[in-house]
Each structure stands twice: as C-alpha cells, then as structure tokens.
Amino acid sequence: MKGPDVFQLERDGDRYVASVARFGEPFVQQELSGLALGDTVYAGLFVCAHNDTVLERALFDNVRLIVPAPEDFVPYQDYIGSLLEVLDVETGRRKVLYTSEASIQAPNWTPDGRALIYNQDGLLYRFDLATRRPSVIPTGFATQNNNDHVLSPDGRWLGLSHHAPEYGGRSIIYVVPIEGGTPRQVTPTGPSYLHGWSPDGRYLVYTAERDGDYDIYRIPVEGGEEVRLTDTPAG
C-alpha cells in the first residue's frame, strides 16, 4: 500500500505483524514468524524521502506503546487502567485527555461541549476540558452508580442508575441536578438501567427486568407509571 496514514506493529513472541491502512479502510497486513530477537526489542519510527536532493519534514501523531492484557484477564473483575480520549469522527484523529489507574466508564459530552461526565468506582465525575482536571459530582447516598447515566437535553440534570441497598442492590434510576445534590428516585423498582432522555425532556427510557424478562420501558421524569415499549420474552 502506498501512502497509508495509520501504521501498527504487533509482537507476539517470535511473531510480528505489520498493519497499514488509510483512514476509513481495512488494514493490510504482513506477518513474519520465527524471528527470534530475544526478550528485549527496540522499535523506532523513521522516514525516507528517496530523494537526496529534497529535505522533507514528517510528523508522527498519536504514537502509543500498548501492553496487552494478560491471557487470564477477567473483564469487570480485573482492571488495567483507562485512557480518557476523544476521537474526531471525520478525520479519525484520537487525542488522550487523561489517564487513570482506575476504570473510567461511559464518558458523556455535556451539551455545551465543555466537559465530559463519566463513571469511576461508583461515583460520577465531571472532566473539565479547559483545565483537564476531573472533579466528583456529589450525588448524596448514590455511591454505587453503574455506567448507565444520561444528561438531560438542556444539560441541567443528570440521570443515574444506582444499586440501592434497600432494593437488594438492584439498579434504580434517579435524577440529580448536574452540579450535584440529593438524587430523586424515578423508577419504582429494579433492576432498571437508564439509557436515554427524550429530546423534549419529558421522559426517561431504560432497560428493565420485570417478571424475568428484560425489555425497554419509558417513564415520566417526575416519576409515575412506567410504560413497557417492547414485549419479547427473554431470559
């Protein structure tokens, strides 16, 4: 391939795989096996103009060295840290904003584009894009939040799913002001996992288990009777 803008080199023991692509296209791969280079291997980046009369300048972007998770890695039990990053969907350019040894989950943009809201260790955090610093959003008793949280269309409210001890640890949906406060319960029972807020701001849409079946439900933000939107028997 000529002119790729994505390059990836992978090592697995004595096996090496080079993958190149242009943005938006599949990788083209070349594999080399049986190359015994020992335990310590150095990797570098270089460019060649193929023309000794021309001086060119090259820029390498988003260069990373990634150590894969161990083979016995158990998701949601073992953790290897997190990168909070943003992706330009038009160009494919990625940018790491923040690193953490903890598990960062479900970043959501605030409507004004100034911050990201994410879950970490049962708490919700606001990551300010200007200062590049996270701060805890106080949510009172709700300290066992999972990654099913949603911002209201106007950015003033935050819906969250908290594993409430009084409901046997099942996930219950609450709403709280975006700056934090005491959560107000919305769903009457659980497990209920929040996934959407209607554009008009009137309803919450969520996945819930009722009588052994998981389906999609809708409920007014103020609370009240929930409406079952799907009816598919499933375990």
Image: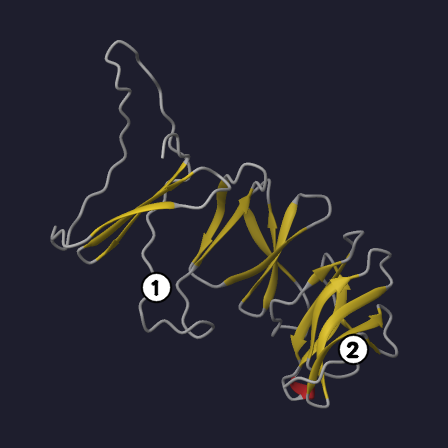
In this view, which residue lies farthest toward the top? 53
Q: Which mark is residue 69?
A: 1
Local secondary structure at mark 1: loop
Residue at horizontal 58%, vertical 42%? 89
Left or right of residue 179, residue 134 in this image: left
Badge 2 crowding class, 10 Å Cα cut-off, few under 14, some 14 to 19, many 20 or more, is many
Q: Which residue is mark 2?
A: 187
Q: Residue at x 39, y 30 (%)?
A: 3
Determine whether 15 is above or below 209 in the image. Answer: above
Counting every numbered tag in the picture gives 2
| Badge 2 amino acid | Thr
- Residue 121 at what x, y percent from top left? 53, 68
Q: How is the image coloured?
A: secondary structure
Q: Amino acid at mark 1?
A: Ala
Q: Are marks 1 and 2 in contact (CB under 8 Å)?
A: no
| 219 to 95, vertically: above or below | below
In percent of width and height, residue 228 lies at 81, 78
Up-down relation of residue 176 to residue 88 (above or below): below
User: Based on the displayed image, in which of its 4 quarters is residue 135 positioned?
Assistant: bottom right
Name the quadrant containing residue 169: bottom right
Q: Give the spatial CA distance, label 1 vs label 2.
A: 38 Å
Q: How busy is the neighbourhood of tag 1: few (under 14 within 10 Å), some, or many (20 plus)?
A: few
